[in-house]
Amino acid sequence: MTTLLNTFEKLPREKQIKILDAAAEAFASKGYYGSGIKEICERANISNGALYKYFLNKEELFMAVLDRCQQIMVEYLYEKHTKIESSILHTIEEYLKEIADICEKFPSYLTVYANLGAPHMEKFSERFSERFKESGKYIYDMVSEAKNRGEVIEEVDERALGFLIDNQFILFLYSMLSDYHEKRFRSFMTIEDEIELTTEMKIAFILDSLKAFFK
Amino acid sequence: MTTLLNTFEKLPREKQIKILDAAAEAFASKGYYGSGIKEICERANISNGALYKYFLNKEELFMAVLDRCQQIMVEYLYEKHTKIESSILHTIEEYLKEIADICEKFPSYLTVYANLGAPHMEKFSERFSERFKESGKYIYDMVSEAKNRGEVIEEVDERALGFLIDNQFILFLYSMLSDYHEKRFRSFMTIEDEIELTTEMKIAFILDSLKAFFK
Amino acid sequence: MTTLLNTFEKLPREKQIKILDAAAEAFASKGYYGSGIKEICERANISNGALYKYFLNKEELFMAVLDRCQQIMVEYLYEKHTKIESSILHTIEEYLKEIADICEKFPSYLTVYANLGAPHMEKFSERFSERFKESGKYIYDMVSEAKNRGEVIEEVDERALGFLIDNQFILFLYSMLSDYHEKRFRSFMTIEDEIELTTEMKIAFILDSLKAFFK
Amino acid sequence: MTTLLNTFEKLPREKQIKILDAAAEAFASKGYYGSGIKEICERANISNGALYKYFLNKEELFMAVLDRCQQIMVEYLYEKHTKIESSILHTIEEYLKEIADICEKFPSYLTVYANLGAPHMEKFSERFSERFKESGKYIYDMVSEAKNRGEVIEEVDERALGFLIDNQFILFLYSMLSDYHEKRFRSFMTIEDEIELTTEMKIAFILDSLKAFFK
DNA sequence: CATGAATGAGTTTTCATTCAT
DNA sequence: CATGAATGAAAACTCATTCAT
């Protein structure tokens, strides 16, 4: 009488999280196809069969992880920024800090989410296309309102600036999660491998790159 | 006395390319773990055993594909731009066109390359860390020289601007290869799904976002 | 002081039947190995655990279904024919009609029963070997009495005729339950696939094949 | 370039037979769903993977076994009887002997074939429906010709007699393969369990049951 | 060298059975 | 007693890799 997902939903939240965490960790570190059900179950300390009571198959488990990704991003990123009260540069800084924060708190989920951009993940990423419109709208509004408040230089189109800012966000996010993008960051900042590259430094660097847009 | 060439290198270049193309197509569309040796051999019209004569294993084959990625990028992207003769905005435009061009010519290789950023590809991406320094340097130089020519506004740091421009390049590249990033682009440009989004429109949009930096 | 009834026997007869019906349907349509406990429980509207309170395991459940098969056959087939009052040909006709009847009333049980003949069911069919003697005896008696009444031609051995008649019964039964045997029937009657083959036609055909034995 | 079945067809006939034999034995003794691929491979002395090179899946393997069943029956049963030269009773006797013969030579295949009549095997038996027409035709012709030669009593319809004879054949076949039907046979012959029931005895019994039809 | 059949450990998934609540 | 979540061995099937020809 109950759907399969309900079996999972009936679990204590703590256990749900443990399972999703285990899956997210696996998917983040080995990718979808590289991760095995067995390993995930071991990490989550549940039996092989239990997982298939909770989820119809591996795909559904992955989807559940993606749902939690979105949940996390909404809860920690978007909901915190419903009101833009201070200057846009400050807002951007706050936003970057927030990104850094959730990347530290939920690296696996964010990684899984970030990897959706790969072409062979199209099958999974489709369900997220709606999110872009929201995200795009959010940044556009931020810029638009700032322009109304006279904070933004006249010469630039709000949408184009929004896109540019979002690109900075995205690649900052990537740099928090992948060595590859971290190295790219270092390279532009001309920081040697031995020297530590702190989040603050990265944020300052990004803000620096953007300040020409604001009065 | 030549260096001891391995069996793959002894093949006629044409056949080498055919094999690498087949592999790149598979890896691009299905990812590393999702691609099977059998399928690649069939696409390349060689026998299963032959592949293992040419490459030690799947990993080595993937590495060879990555090497060709780099080769392509050097040949088509970097070597074409050793001299910066015209205005920086024009140079950027040319560069974006070039990116669009190689994405159309070698979508699979570029896709494979683009996906290296995923954390579970770290094992493979390490060998490319050197490239960033070059790439970073190249863009930095471009900006630096433009600044010397007085094309760039004073307020912005060359490295930060270089990073920002490179971010635009990267996400433009991604948008050429993945639906996911294409949709993100559309979302910011507020273009409906039904309307075609041409490369020219994207390039114009990016240039628009950057022009505030240049006099 | 009653005998120690097991839990199943303590259930209201109605519920017992519901469970056995569910099991019989599953076993008939998917075979013993193809049927799942879960599905049976769902059909019977009982919990998974309950079934294991009633039966030691799947095998015992199957045995219980077989017992009900036998019960049904005794009740509907054998008990109805304790007295042979009319002519043997008429008795045979009545018998065939009875077979058709219970096949329509209890197709699942009859199917399960019919499939016991398969060698991989030997494990289960052993407990029925006794039944043959009864059944054989019954038919033998029928023929024997008819012979005494002078209805049967002299040249034929009662036992051999009994066997032959029983074979007709059995394959008629099979034809009521399985498409395969139905098709065989059609083939001999040279009836096209499109034309309906009624039970009456089959019975008439069988009687026709037997009438040479009777005066 | 080659279809999957061809991989199997390329094997030396001996090995093909060994694999099909192993499969037939398993399917005969445990049924389709009760038989495991692993066990079959072990019996055939091939690896698990090899089997999947030869056959797309378990179903295809089963089909191949069925094909061999048919092959055997055609080769040993039908082809031997293209001409009916002697008296029909003698022909029937020969035919029964032949059945006994192939049952002894290929018990597994015959068993698999015999079990196709079970309703849950409908999925597989469909492809054999054509065979009935042939088989029916064959027996009908045999009876028909005998009638023309004046061997058959007038009162009986050829088709009905054909059906009756075929029923005897089928249940004789079953009795060679399954204990269950063997016991049924015994019961009608009133032979004790301890006494051996030879094939000759069974054949004689059947012939006895049929002789009333022939002059 | 090239071939492609063979291997077998590994994958995802199922399911009879158990057991805490 | 009843429940249904949990178990884990076993199923069908895959695939990177090897090796006889």
Image: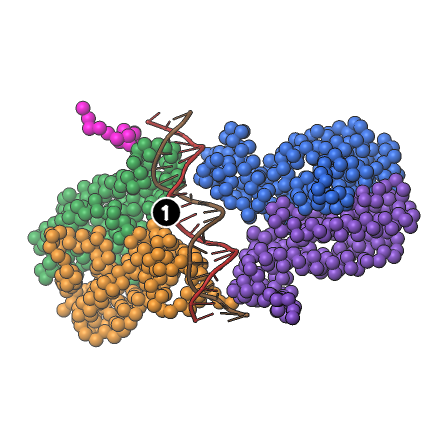
Chain colours: A blue, B purple, C green, D orange, E brown, F red
User: In the image, residue C199 lies at what x, y percent?
Assistant: 29, 52
Residue at 81 percent across and 35 percent down: it is A144
Residue at 36 percent across and 69 percent down: it is D13
Q: Quadrant of residue A154?
A: top right
- Image-based side of D14 in relation to A148, left or right: left
Q: Chain of mark 1?
A: C
Give above or below for B122 relative to A151. Answer: below
Could you tell me which secondary element the residue under label 1 belongs to?
Answer: helix
- Image-based side of D31 in relation to B58, left or right: left
Give above or below for D193 relative to A1. Answer: below
Q: Which residue is mark 1?
A: C34
Q: Quadrant of residue D142?
A: bottom left
The foreground one among B119 and D62 is B119
User: In the image, residue A68 lies at what x, y percent?
Assistant: 60, 35
The foreground one among B202 and B45 is B45
Mark 1 crowdedness (10 Å alpha carbons): few <14, some 14-19, many ≥20: some
Q: Quadrant of residue A172?
A: top right
Residue at 41 percent across and 65 percent down: it is D8
User: In the image, residue D124 lies at what x, y percent?
Assistant: 38, 56
Q: Is residue D125 visible?
A: no
Q: Quadrant of the C terminus of chain A?
A: top right
- Image-based side of C203 in relation to A151, left or right: left
Which region of the structure is painted magenta? Answer: C1-14
Q: Is residue A153 visible?
A: yes
Reply yes or no: does residue C13 show up in magenta: yes
Residue at 36 percent across and 33 percent down: it is C49
User: In the image, residue A42 lies at what x, y percent?
Assistant: 48, 38
The foreground one among D117 and D107 is D107
Reply yes or no: does residue A163 show up in magenta: no
* Dot 1 amino acid type: Gly
